[in-house]
Image (cartoon, rainbow, N blue to C red):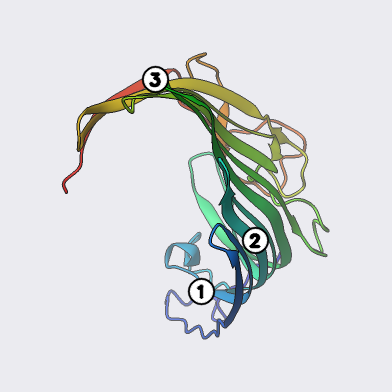
Amino acid sequence: MSRAISADPVSESFAERYRGFSPKLGLRWDWRPELQVYANLSRSFEPTSFGELTGGLRPTINEAQRATILELGSRGRMAQLEWDVSLFEAHLHDELLQIATNTAGANVTVNAARSVHRGLELGLSGKALASEAGRLEWRLQGLWNDFHLKGDPSYGSRRLPGVPRHAARAQLGWRFEGGSLLALHAEGAGGYPIDFANSFRAPGYAVWGLKASGEFQPGLGWFVDGRNLADRRYVATTGVVRDARGRDTAQFLPGDGRSVYAGIDWKFN
């Protein structure tokens, strides 16, 4: 990875000018009212923020991040099934990446000359077993990605750290005739490296909970949501370092333990 520094080694100025052009071409085909297919080809441009210019005694003047992105997708519904699915691939130049410099939360932002982001985003929902007593409802959200460097002089084409390759959320519940809902929900993610050398990994996890919701009257509702009811210890997110050298390091942030949330929804018409 490269790190662009201000041309003046003693300058403390944050003055920098970025210019970019971000065109987009989109196509959409509505085959029928319930089915849509689309494609997008676009360019993105992201200059550094003030926070991304810091990280030392003097400003670190990084290059702006640029990308070319192709997205193909479909959304629609058929019978009791609804979907929203998208495939994407992005080729990035000078991607802005944060790297932890110590265990106290300090970090520095650098540019990666070339990298690739590709993946699949999937959303499904449906209903089944409808009767006078109610119906079964389910929902699934999934993500698969392949984010990696491309020809980096130090790390080759290794995976970008800090991002799980797989993640999913699911809910299965019964909607009673009066509108109340009782549901089981779960979420999880696969393991992933915490360093650019891919020498040490965060473990994957899966947690589950229960949710109930309903209405006292139209516009006034209630909910109770229990999360991680098994009280599992897991890594929710991590910092990112250059090379952990295959050893554990203080970059892991724990997820919430067993918890219950309750509240009232009041909607104004």
Q: Disc 3 on helix, strand or loop? A: strand
Mark 1 against mark 2, which lies toward the viewer? Answer: 2
Q: What's the residue at 52%, 29% (across, down)? A: 171
Q: Position of residue 39 (x, y in %)?
A: 65, 70
Give the CA separation, mark 3 to mark 2.
36 Å
Q: Residues within 10 Å of mark 1 (few under 14, many from 20)?
A: some
Q: Disc 2 on helix, strand or loop? A: strand
- First in sequence: mark 1 vs mark 2: 1
Tag shown at residue 134: none
Q: Nearer the viewer, residue 71 or 62?
A: 71
Q: Nearer the viewer, residue 171 or 218?
A: 218
- First in sequence: mark 3 vs mark 2: 2
Tag shown at residue 73: 2
Position of the N terminus, as image quadrant, is bottom right
Mark 1 against mark 3, which lies toward the viewer? Answer: 3
When asked about the image quadrant of residue 25, the answer is bottom right
Residue bearing mark 1: 47
Up-down relation of residue 268 to residue 206 (above or below): below
- Asked whether the viewer can see residue 98, the reply is no
Q: Give amino acid for label 1.
A: Pro
Q: Position of residue 161 (x, y in %)?
A: 68, 47
Give the CA separation, mark 1 to mark 3.
39 Å
Up-down relation of residue 39 to residue 22 (above or below): above
